[in-house]
């Protein structure tokens, strides 16, 4: 995949992740008001949002790694692994393979490196100017809302 194509696909993926996150939040509110099946819909769209962030994470790495060094590779690997772990936990919860308590573990462990990646992405954009400023503000807003 060329860098230009990765950037285009990652941009679309990021926008879809934002939409999935908004749907997850909507279904979370509905779950607390009306119960199931909204909890499972929240879990599904949360998992989808995380999986859709994998390509943007790769794109951030491709754009900035020359200027930043090894720590970005480690952070990207940890974030992608965290995205996969947290998403898998949500999907396993929907399928009733794991219980809610276990999903808190997979979600908590998985989301920690994702939050670090959001902070790193915001720093790369807002302090280092290696990414568009809008990307940095989105990362900062996502980190702040978490």
Image (tube, helix red, strand yellow):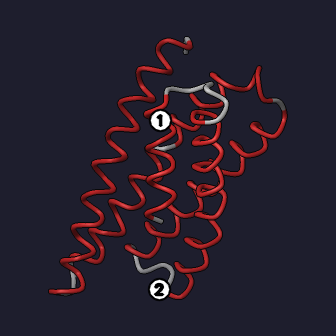
Q: Nearer the viewer, mark 1 or mark 2?
A: 1
Q: Is residue 16 above or below residue 23?
A: above
Q: Residue at x 42, y 25 (%)?
A: 9
In the image, 42: left or right of 51? Answer: left
Check disc 1 and report its element: helix, strand or loop: helix
Give x and y (percent) for residue 125.
58, 33
Which quadrant of the view contains residue 2? top right
Disc 1: which residue: 135
Q: Residue at x 26, y 68 (%)?
A: 41
- Who is closer to the viewer here, 7 or 39? 7
Disc 2: which residue: 100
Give x and y (percent) for residue 75.
73, 46
In the image, 116: left or right of 122? Answer: right
Q: CA distance from mark 1 to mark 2?
A: 33 Å
Q: Residue at x 55, y 15 (%)?
A: 1
Give x and y (percent) for residue 14.
40, 38
Q: Is residue 28 above or below residue 102?
A: above
Please count the marks in the image: 2
Nearest to N terminus: mark 1 or mark 2: 2
């Amino acid at each position: 995949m060329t860098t230009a194509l990765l950037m285009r696909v990652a941009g679309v993926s990021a926008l879809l992740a934002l939409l999935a996150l908004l749907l997850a939040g909507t279904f979370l509110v509905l779950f607390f008001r009306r119960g199931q099946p909204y909890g499972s819909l929240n879990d599904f769209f949360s998992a989808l949002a995380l999986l859709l962030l994998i390509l943007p994470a790769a794109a951030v790495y491709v754009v900035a790694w020359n200027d930043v060094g090894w720590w970005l590779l480690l952070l990207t690997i940890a974030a992608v692994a965290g995205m996969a772990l947290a998403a898998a936990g949500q999907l396993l919860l929907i399928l009733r393979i794991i219980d809610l308590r276990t999903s808190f573990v997979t979600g908590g462990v998985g989301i920690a490196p994702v939050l670090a990646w959001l902070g790193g992405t915001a720093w790369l954009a807002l302090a280092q100017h290696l990414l568009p400023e809008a990307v940095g503000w989105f990362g900062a807003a996502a980190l702040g809302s978490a």
